[in-house]
Image (cartoon, rainbow, N blue to C red):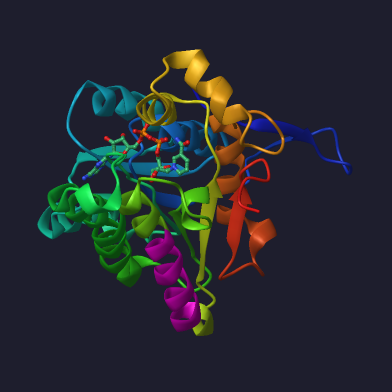
Amino acid sequence: MRLTRVRATASSATVTVMGQLDGLNVLLTGGASGIGLATANLFVSEGASVHILDLPGEKLDAAARVVAPTGGSVSACDVTERSQVDAAVSTATSGGRPIDVVIANAGISSPAAPFTEYPLDAFERVMKVHVVGAFHTIQAALPHVPDGGSVIITSSVAGLVGTPQVVAYGTAKHAQIGMMRSLAVDYAPRGIRVNTINPGPVDNEFQTSFEERITGQSGKDANAIFDTMIPLGRHIPMDDIAHGMLYLAGPHSRNVTSTIFRIDGGMGG
Ligand SMILES: NC(=O)c1ccc[n+]([C@@H]2O[C@H](COP(=O)([O-])OP(=O)(O)OC[C@H]3O[C@@H](n4cnc5c(N)ncnc54)[C@H](O)[C@@H]3O)[C@@H](O)[C@H]2O)c1
């Protein structure tokens, strides 16, 4: 089913079907669940063709059904493996299609531990998924991005302020902002915009399991403790982040680059 908004034109009785992303081709990592899946749903409803890169499994199979109506597809892909990213980009560009929007969103949580006890293997894995994964995704996609395209990296409020005991995640999310600023300068001459989106605590499984580890409480009790740390006092719905992605992908942000787009309830200070 094609879900697009319908507008009546002023000049005639005809009805024009329009989406903000009609005809755009989007490469999205980590789109099989959470923020990425919410973004895929919204982008399909706005007319985009969305190609999801994520780890294999039932969630990815279900995501294939979400993106099918506008000609999207999914690729089983570990973003830390360059050959897998290259293969997925080939699928997304088959027939010579450009990639108008790149979203490096795949991510994992990190263990919570004091720095002196922090496991190096976990530190390296978190850096690899968030930082090397974004590097592979954007580097593989860029040859297919036309002038005026948009690149979005999902960083975090943890990329803006220190979070106790999660040095891996905090380092990775700050590093993604450095990558964004470097690429924004490099690609501005071609009109390619590069921004991060920085969610605060989101109302989803990824964040709840993190909060349970940090607080030692379960579910809603853990969420309630985190609510007290957010100036607006509540977790952020995934759909709000998806609409932030829509803004950064769409025409209304055509003069926005090198921006840290916070949707964090004020938590980033
Ligand atoms: N949930 C939050 O509160 C929150 C806040 C700020 C930032 N973020 C960031 O948002 C992004 C999405 O997180 P989410 O909350 O939707 O969590 P999620 O776990 O629902 O989604 C993450 C997706 O990334 C995929 N992924 C993980 N490792 C991968 C790999 N090596 N290759 C390909 N795909 C991989 C997972 O399979 C999953 O589908 C992450 O970068 C996360 O760090 C989340």
Q: Is residue 49 or residue 207 the one in the foreground?
A: 207
Examine the rendering and report whether any part of residue 168 can be seen.
yes
Please, is residue 8 above or below residue 212 in the view?
below
Q: Residue 259 placed where, x, y %?
A: 59, 65
Q: Is residue 102 or residue 119 the one in the foreground?
A: 119
* Image quarter (top left, top right, bottom left or bottom right) of the C terminus: bottom right
> Majority secondary structure of the magenta segment?
helix
Left or right: residue 12 versus residue 100 is right
Please, is residue 15 above or below residue 219 in the view?
below
* Residue ID at (26%, 29%): 60
* Residue ID at (38%, 65%): 175
Q: What is the quadrant of residue 98 in the picture?
A: bottom left
Examine the rendering and report whether any part of residue 21 can be seen.
no
Q: Is residue 223 or residue 113 the one in the foreground?
A: 113
Q: Quadrant of ligand 1?
A: top left
Q: Residue 89 placed where, x, y %?
A: 24, 55
Q: Residue 249 placed where, x, y %?
A: 55, 54
What stretch of residues is rendered in magenta? 174-187
* Residue ID at (58%, 61%): 260
Please, is residue 5 above or below residue 135 in the view?
above
Left or right: residue 37 versus residue 54 is right
